[in-house]
Amino acid sequence: MDIIIIGGGASGIFAAINLKKYNNNVRILEKNSRIGKKLLVTGNGRCNYSNINLSENNYNKPEFVKNAIDSFSNTDLVNYFKMMGLYSCVENNRIYPITLKANSVLSILMKKLSEKNICINTDTEVLSVSKEKDKFKLITNKGEFYCHKLIVACGGSSMPKSGSDGSFFKILKKLGHRVTPIFPALTQIKLESAYLKHLQGTKVVGKVKLYSKEKLIIEKYGDLLFTSYGISGPPILDISVKLSEYNDLYIEMPLINYSDKIDKEEIFSSFYMFNDYSIDEFLLGLVDKKFIHYILETLEIKSNTPLNFLEKYYSDIIDILFNSKFYVKGTTGFENSQVTRGGVDISEVSPFDFSSKICDGLYIIGEALDVDGECGGYNLHFAFACAYTLSKNFNY
């Protein structure tokens, strides 16, 4: 049997390794000059490949994902890599290779590909796919290929420089599949504010809330980082997936670190305790110095004004310290998104072996599906889990 896998990313590589068990020919077609290009940049190059808190509830389509992550859990993946000689470590519930290098993961996987004599064709872009009786015919920039089983692992539209530019969705549509609208997910958020350049590089730890027309949509807790265009950090990546669903958005966030552990009444009382301080001196003990300029400019207060002259502003100061509001302009797009929201409609794909219900012999795995998870290793785990589940239940 001839099996072709389109895409040499995490799911494509893992599928190839696990499918090469019998007397079959497995070939990877990759349009980049090397395989695993996107894998190398996951987790900021550290390869956060799973999470201690892994569950189907970490994904947008929990019922579809459940079988794959039950079949191949975080413990299964850690042990799988361990049997290949790659050890792991845990940091803030995120699972990494013990080297903290994505290249270690790719090198181990490439070693296994070599051991199994799996053929890899790089710089090979698939231009069209058609079904001829019991075989698929693939026309590429390097000629024609034929196979009995075709596995699509070409990714979505995120990080197009890595090769996953969404172009293969057109081919999947021609094969009869529906592709849901796609949007960038797990990406930074652009804000409307005249103070962004001043706040750039400022960090705060706390809860960020996303609102649409005064309605709370989602809230997440963690490290927040102001940038020249807006804001970033793991909680921002997680809430970014909601931007495509709502209008008139804004975020609320604290300027004080760990504000959830601070009593507002205590801060309010301290206005009177330190009433001989200037507002500038008072704020120095509460927030990053860059925030002081933003607070005073927003409230139109001079920095040397004594606290005892500002009693009418006390509630406003408390409000901006704990619930600063910034209006949302949008995301930084697919160029910077870690995953794609949207893809092949999961109602047309089996969650047990990822076979197409539309086209016999076709399988679709990884980010090409309308499945995405939260920030923290969940998406990469799904890439490995669906590839493993496919191979486990594959119809040879």
Image (spheres, grey):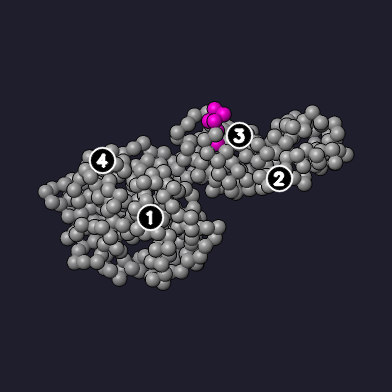
Picture coordinates of residue 153 (x, y %)?
31, 52
Name the residue that disc number 2 marks. 262
Disc 1, SS = helix
Seen from the viewer's position, the closer of residues 25 and 349 is: 349
Name the residue that disc number 4 marks. 177
> Most prominent secondary structure in the magenta stretch?
strand
What amino acid type should be assigned to the residue bearing mark 4? Answer: His
Picture coordinates of residue 195 (x, y %)?
65, 36
Q: Which mark is residue 326?
A: 3
Q: Earlier in the sequence, mark 1 or mark 3?
A: 1
Quarter of the image for the C terminus: give it: bottom left
Name the residue that disc number 1 marks. 69
What amino acid type should be assigned to the residue bearing mark 3? Answer: Phe
* Magenta-colored stretch includes residue 106: no
* Residue located farthest toward the left when viewing the structure as drawn: 133
Quarter of the image for the N terminus: give it: bottom left
Q: Quadrant of residue 38?
A: bottom left
Q: Is residue 214 above or below residue 209?
A: above
Q: Does residue 123 appear in this view?
A: no
Stretch in magenta: 210-215
Q: Is residue 84 above or below residue 31?
A: below
Q: Earlier in the sequence, mark 3 or mark 4?
A: 4
Picture coordinates of residue 189 (x, y %)?
53, 39
